[in-house]
Image (cartoon, helix red, strand yellow):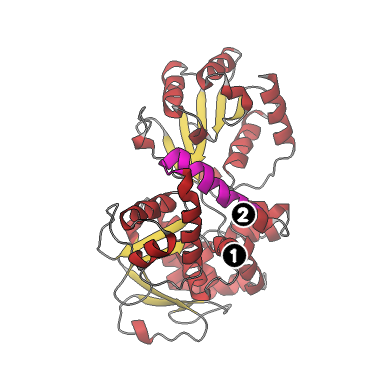
Amino acid sequence: MDALFSLQHRLLSNLSERKRYLFHRINWDQRLIGIIGPRGVGKTTMMLQRIKDLSGSSDKAAYVSIDHPYFEARPLYDFAETFASYGGELLCVDEVHKYPEWSSQIKAIYDSIPDLRVVFSGSSILRMSAQKADLSRRALVYELNGLSFREYLFFSRGLGLSCLDLKEILDNHVSLANEVVRQIKILPPFKEYLEHGYYPFFLEGKDNYQMKLNAVLGQVLESDLPLAASIAPRQVGKLKKLLYLLSISSPVIPDIAKLARMTGISRPSIYGYLEKLHEARIIRLVRQAGGGAKVLARPEKIYLDNTNLAGALAQTPDLGSIRETFFASQIAVSQARQHLVSQDLSIPDQGDFLVKGQWTFEIGGKGKKQSQIANTPQSYLAIDDIEVGHGRRIPLWLFGFLY
């Protein structure tokens, strides 16, 4: 146990003071909190920041990572029981998806040690309701996503700007954009963000960013998916090929039969793999408006989860896909914040995206015309390479302020 606390003190001594958007939305007073999300977005940092805020350098709060050798021979419950007997009040458990029967251990701690609060983190692919010990009724679960463009400006430039509501952007985008561009030349950092701004580890150096991102992608495919989604390790190579093909494609309706032939994955299996990659936040499946979201329903379009992944998977990613991927990634998180379901981002008959069944968006460069959606009510253009828009032409970068 001494070795675990020694590691914790070292981690706390090098901890960033800047907090992600989710930190202040979490109800930290709950007895059982789950933080799920993609690798590399800052779940560990967030738990350590909570420990530092709560107890500083005292031993009333503990951080442990399940992949530490300590837990190869000792049950998590035994550690929690001993920690609580010495006055421990908060236990933060990282990487729970790597621990066999983790949900049963967490449930036992919750049921048997009422004075100990627990925060656990894990892959976004975890399904609380699918665990043998159902935690869905006990745990308050939050999802942490990668940095928004607004957060990137905060972390990289120290520029503290407020979140914006989508309706606020639609109604007041000219004045909102002018307020920002008075403070910073916005297009250069936006291009940076699209390439290397989604994951907070860009702060450790841009030269190593792609290497670290490739390592994150490899861990998801080679470790997280086999562990949490029962995908055979021998399929990993085929999944990498599938992702490469998606990264170089323009955002069109996918030809599932063609993808199956080119990857060697059977057509029935490819639907299931796409769903798992979506759950792991590697890709994003966007469905036809009004088409439902059954597990094997055909996705209308397939995007990478965020724009940075395109650079890791392809030398020359499709620019149109990059723009649409950015819009979808920012909109999806902002809608989830409002407890809306995934169908609130869908593909309409005219335009690129329909949000909440109400607003239609067409995405493009500054030469984009509104002819395709001219007769569509409540329709807008999200335009790249402009600082300030007018009318229904809104700068694409401004949608990066939604969370």
Q: Is residue 279 left or right of residue 287?
A: right
N-term mark: 1 or 2: 2
Mark 1 crowd level (few <14, some 14–19, many ≥20, 10 Å Cα): some
Total numbered badges shown on the rendered structure? 2
Residue 341 screen position, x and y as percent: 33, 53
Picture residue at 56% right of the left edge, 62% below the top:
313
Residue 232 screen position, x and y as percent: 44, 43
Q: Is residue 61 magenta?
A: no
Residue 218 screen position, x and y as percent: 57, 49
In the displayed structure, 106 sits above or below 159; it is: above
Give the residue at mark 2: 213
In the displayed structure, 403 sits above or below 255; it is: above
Amino acid type at mark 1? Gly
Q: Which mark is residue 25?
A: none
Q: In the image, which residues are magenta?
A: 212-232
Picture residue at 46% right of the left edge, 18% below the top:
114
Quadrant of the rendered structure where residue 362 is? bottom left
Q: Is residue 217 magenta?
A: yes
Nearest the viewer among 160 and 34 is 34
Mark 2 crowd level (few <14, some 14–19, many ≥20, 10 Å Cα): many
Q: Is residue 132 left or right of residue 399?
A: left
Q: Which mark is residue 311?
A: 1
Picture residue at 41% right of the left edge, 40% below the top:
230
Quadrant of the rendered structure where residue 147 is? bottom right
Callout 2: helix, strand or loop?
helix
In the displayed structure, 110 sits above or below 226; it is: above
Amino acid type at mark 2? Leu
Quadrant of the rendered structure where residue 259 is? bottom left
Tags 1 and 2 in contact by the CB under 8 Å rule? yes
Callout 1: helix, strand or loop?
helix
